[in-house]
Every structure is written in structure tokens, then in C-alpha cells.
Image (tube, rainbow, N blue to C red):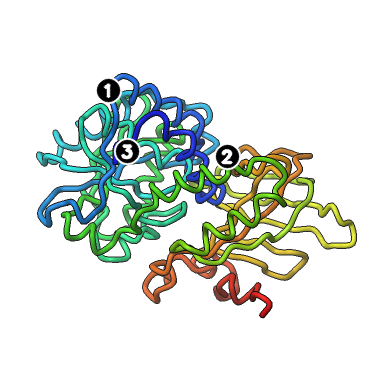
Amino acid sequence: MKLTVDHLEDLARGAVFLATGGGGDPYVAMLTARAALTEFGPVDLIPASALSDDATVVTVGNVGAPSAGLELLMSIDEPQRAIQAYEEHIATRVDALVSFEIGGGNSLIPLIAGAALGLPVVDGDGMGRALPEAQMMTYSIAGVSATPAVVLDYEGYAVVLDADNPLDYEHQVRQVSAERGGMVTAVEHPMTGRQLKESIVPATVSFSIELGRVLRESRGRTTQALEPLRALFASSIFGHFEHLYSGKVVDHATSIVGGYDVGHVTIESFDTSQPNLTLDVKNEFLVARIGTEVVASVPDLITVVDDETTEPISAERLRYGQRVSVLGTGCPPMLRTGAALAVVEPRAFGFDFDFVPIEQLHPRQA
């Protein structure tokens, strides 16, 4: 499939929906991708199966607090220079690029580099959503090393990182990000084509385009988009889809802590007899509670959309008074394995409860 500028708006819209609030601002990345594809031409989007087993594949994207990305705007050549710095420092020729998360702006960054360098982008990612830490990628869970990695800051300064495990790498890259303005471009998780095939969440780029199309064609009040979205997710690797809540944002407080946007959101129901819904945030929306009852949690997806347009809203763009709906979606099966849950379930984020799949929290009526 040739990805052109005509795909970008749907891709960005679908990807920010799957980003569960994180993944970086999609608007700036979409404009940058549009400029790159206009200048350099379309990008080949290929399935992982099209790669030879000995191909060299790397992930590329932004690492840092999404709110910082609203100030440190990415240039059109930044992802390209990051890949070139990687090839120079590691003395390895890259054959293909892939997203480390199909979330927000990070879903578009491989396209920017791929267009400039003439490299294909693999249809898939390492999360099937956005998550805040490197050890939470399916690549890491499958045993792919996050390093050697190259991190490029906004001034073009490149740092080579090496770590014994993904958690150590996560600490290293967050430190560099915090020291270099709060947002950097990282090239990481070098792997062979065979390793990629064994670890990727497949076809999430093309799914994001289709999801964006459904959102565009269903634009309007969230209630009218629910059935098209439910049908789309039911036929996908995500499965269950649920409308959790609708109301007005009455509190939104986040701050940058350790390189992440951390905080909470409170939403007051349009039906005043219903308790408030609260969202815990660490870049992404991690837990949704109505009153004290957990109604969805990581690794399942929690998405906030504008109630009047069904446009997904990233966490850093939520504001007091916005009228929103909160939607819940099942996560890809790869995130529900024992090895994955050890690093992506609520307890991995410090919450004192176990993960319960959304379809069990909200069973369908027979």
C-alpha cells in the first residue's frame, strides 16, 4: 500500500483515538508528515511478512512529556537525522521502520523519516495503543533489546544509549529527555525481520486509517457514532467497545514528573444523579472510575472524545468545561499474556488492584 497525503488525516484521527490520551500531539506531526510526503512522495506501507528474516528494522518516535511536545515543535528533517545518526553511530544500515506505538503523533513519525529516506514502514506497532514506558512494548516483552539506541534532541545533539534491560533504558532515555527540554526523538529496538514478525501488533496503521474514516464519516454527536465504532472494533483485534460516560470536564490537573505528564481528570455527568468519573493519567489515561468503581483500566484502552464531534482528545489538550464522552476498548490479545500483564497491568503503575478485562466489567446482554 502506498501511503499518501490523502491518508494522513484519517490516520492521525484514528491513531489519536488508539493513543488513549498519549502518544504526542497528532496535529503538528500530521502537518510535518504532510510536508514530508509532499516533498518526497508516498511511503510504502508493508506487512511484516514482506520483510526478509535478516532485514534490519528499527523503531523511531518521540519520547518525553506530551505537553512539552506542544512547545518543542518537530522539524521535517528531525526523524530523518535521527535515523542517519543511528546508522552512523551503530554502523548499521536500516532496511525498514516501524512505530513503537500506534498513538497520536508517534504513529506518523516513521512516515516522515521513511519518505525522506525512501524506506518502507511496517504496518503495525509495539503496543496496539500508547503506553508510557519502553518495557511495555511487545518488542521488549518478546525479548528484543531496546538498545543500542540513538536519541536526538531539538538542537541535533545525538546520544548513544546502551542498557542491559528495557527498564534501565527507560530510565536513561527519560533522563536525557528531561535534560534536553522534555522531548527527544529516539531510534531504538533494533531487530531482525524475524524478530519483528514474532513481536509486532499487526496491521494497526491500516486499522487506524479505517478507524479515522469511520470517525470522519460519523462526525457529530458521539451517540450517533457508537454503533459504527462498535461494529468496527468487533471485527478487529481489539474486540469489545463500550461507551462509559458522558459529561463536562470540571477538573484537569497534570504536571511533568520524571519526564511524564502525571495527574488526573474529573468529569461531571450530564445526569447529575450519577457520580463523577475520574481518570488517572501518566501520559495516557490509565484508569477510569465512576465514583469508586473501576469501569476500565490499562492495558485496555480509555479514549476521551468531544461529545459534539466525536473527535478524540489527547490528555494535554483537555480543558475545563469541555463536553466529552469517555469510551473503552479492549486491548490486543498480546497485551493480555502473562508476560505482558507483568509490565502493563494496573499494579505495574502502582495501583492496588488487578486487571479485569473490559468485556467482563461490561458484559453484553444476551
Disc 2 residue type (three-letter):
Arg
Question: On the image, numbered disc 1 is attached to which residue?
Answer: 40
Distance CA(mark 2)–CA(mark 3): 23 Å
- Tell whether 95 sits left or right of 98: left
Name the N-terminal-most of marks 3 and 1: 1
Q: Which mark is residue 216?
A: 2
Name the N-terminal-most of marks 1 and 2: 1
- Looking at the rendered structure, the secondary structure element under dot 1 is helix
- Tell whether 261 sits left or right of 33: right
Total number of numbered labels? 3
- Looking at the rendered structure, the secondary structure element under dot 3 is helix
State the image coordinates of residue 229 (x, y, percent, origin top left): 58, 55
Disc 3 residue type (three-letter):
Pro
**Label 3: few (<14), some or many (≥20) within 10 Å?**
many
Distance CA(mark 3)–CA(mark 1): 14 Å
State the image coordinates of residue 88 (x, y, percent, origin top left): 14, 33
Q: Are marks 3 and 1 in contact (CB under 8 Å)?
A: no
Disc 1 residue type (three-letter):
Phe
Identify the residue at image location x=30%, y=60%.
140
Identify the residue at image location x=23%, y=35%.
83
Q: Which dot, 2 or 3, sits closer to the camera?
A: 2
In the picture as drawn, the residue positioned furthest to the bottom comes out as: 366
Q: Which mark is residue 110?
A: 3
